[in-house]
Amino acid sequence: MADAEAPSPPSADDYAATGALFRAASERFDDFTIMRHKSDLTGEWVSHTWKDLRKMVDETAAALAAEGVERGDRVAILANSRMEWCVADLANFTIGAVTVPVYQSNLPDEVEYILDHSGAKIVFVEDGEQLSKVQQIRAACPAVTRAIQFSGKVRSDDEFVRALDRFRDAGREYMEAHPGILDERLDAVTREDMATIVYTSGTTGRPKGAVLTHDALLFEIGSLGSVMRVDTTDETLLFLPMAHIFARVGFLVTLQCGFIISFAENIATVMT
């Protein structure tokens, strides 16, 4: 959106949960651009507004609810930093689910440990390569009932995995059949609720799961947002892994500031 006066940003201090802050930001910033990324199909840069992001998040959140994901259930994300990573994260926050980030570089046995230790019920995967890791260790993680694949071809005869587009279709249908369901789920989330479990790298032993509440995330967002002199006219390039809290907070602070997130195509092309 060009040549429009930016609205006053929401304050993280005024909201009970991260999902509620996102909703407020999406309503205030509306048609302003929030994300840019390169299309998997055309290789061209694509822009999305806050309104676009809200639609994607709501559909994904409703689909998770339709899958039986309840408040406090763990939902893992195994993918490189990309727009869909943020959509899944915000969808989890909307219904009170707990995001469990997994590094895309993790080997199958490392993925197994985190999924099993966290008790993840659903896992979002980037593509067929990441899905293969989950398929290899699926028997050891019986709590995982579904994988949702962001990109690449998905076999129609595999009931365990769904393409993200199909998953969001199911979310739209669920919202039509259950009007107000997302408001109801979001209203139940409190600052004391667990928001995410961030696992350490495991260099000195098995990874440790660091638990962060919504209160912790909102405090960080509010603290950074109050000192960062950025707004809807600013843009940042995100290329660090979202499985690390540094990049994650770097994204979440835009819920208060409204700046644009552009996702790097990959590490190799960051400087080109």
Image: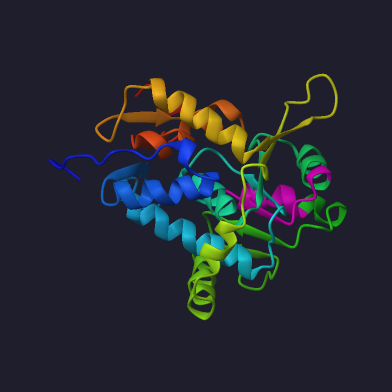
Q: Image height check: is 168 above or below 229?
A: below
Of all residues shown, which one is farthest toward the left?
3
Residue 95 within the segment the image draws in magenta: no
Region of the chain picked out in magenta, as a range: 117-135
Q: Quadrant of the N terminus?
A: top left
Q: Image height check: is 143 above or below 261?
A: below
Q: Is residue 167 visible?
A: no
Q: Could you tell me which residue is drawn at 83 percent across and 19 percent down?
A: 204
The foreground one among 92 and 48 is 92
Q: Provide residue 10's location: percent of width, then percent of height.
A: 38, 40
The foreground one among 211 and 46 is 211
Q: Image height check: is 182 above or below 107?
A: below
Q: Could you tell me which residue is drawn at 57 percent across and 66 percent down?
A: 63
Residue 9 position by quadrant: top left
Q: How many marks?
A: 0
Q: Quadrant of the C terminus?
A: top left
Q: Is residue 244 left or right of residue 21?
A: right
Q: Could you tell me which residue is drawn at 57 percent across and 48 percent down?
A: 126
Of all residues shown, which one is farthest toward the front?
14
Check the image and tell me how it is coloured. Answer: rainbow
Q: Provide residue 237's location: percent of width, then percent of height.
A: 39, 29
The foreground one among 147 and 234 is 234
Q: Is residue 214 left or right of residue 226?
A: right
Q: Provide residue 39's location: percent of width, then percent of height.
A: 37, 49
Residue 119 within the segment the image draws in magenta: yes
Q: Is residue 66 visible?
A: yes
Residue 52 position by quadrant: bottom left
Q: Is residue 253 left or right of residue 73?
A: left
Q: Provide residue 122's location: percent of width, then percent of height.
A: 69, 57
